[in-house]
Amino acid sequence: MRYRPSSGLRSVFIGAALLAGGVLTSAAAEAPALTMLDNLTPGNWELRDRKSGEVRQLCLKNGRDLIQIKHRQPPCNRFVVDNGASSVTVQYTCRGNGYGRTTIRSETPTLVQVSTQGIADGRPFDLAIEGRRTGACR
């Protein structure tokens, strides 16, 4: 006698195979909400490198703009490692241009600490940045 799975069990196997193959999508497969980043105040932000003292300006549309400070160009594939109430860690890969891992800790909606490291343009980077909103974008 040969074993034959029930049609319900067979559907589960087929659905799992299609999901694994990328044919089906689900809410679980979509990017999670990054509430902490979405709660940061948009506007002009000053990013100060805590090691070198170098300062640069960034017109922040939303907090997600801080994830790829060294890889400004899309598209990069992102994987959320930690999604906490006051801290977010995201790992990303930019095909043909390196990768990075960024942790952003929010002190207030206008002050964050950013730690990011990886490879950009074939060179390693390791940055510790304080980000502070300074006003509206110009």
Image (tube, rainbow, N blue to C red):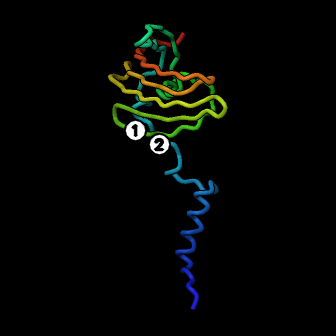
Q: Residue 12 at what x, y percent from top left?
A: 54, 69
Q: Is residue 38 above or below residue 58?
A: below
Amino acid at circle 2: Pro
Image point 49% across, 24% down: which residue?
66
Point out the residue furthest to the front here: 123
Q: What element carries label 1?
A: strand
Which residue is the site of mark 2?
Answer: 32
Amino acid at circle 1: Asn
Towards the viewer: 113 or 132: 113
Image point 51% across, 42% down: which residue?
31
- In what quadrant of the picture does the N terminus appear? bottom right
Q: Residue 87 at what x, y percent from top left?
A: 37, 31
Q: Residue 25 at what x, y percent from top left?
A: 58, 53
Residue 106 figure quarter: top left
- Residue at mark 2 to residue at mark 1: CA–CA distance: 8 Å
Q: Residue 133 at what x, y percent from top left?
A: 42, 15
Residue 21 figure quarter: bottom right
Residue 38's tag is none
How many other residues sit within 10 Å of disc 2, few (<14), some (14-19) or many (≥20)?
few
Image point 40% across, 16% down: which residue?
130
Point out the residue furthest to the bottom here: 1
Towards the viewer: 51 or 48: 51
Towards the viewer: 53 or 125: 125
- In what quadrant of the picture does the C terminus appear? top right
Q: Is mark 2 on a helix, strand or loop?
A: loop
Which comes before the other along the chain, label 2 or label 1? 2
Which residue is the site of mark 1?
Answer: 83
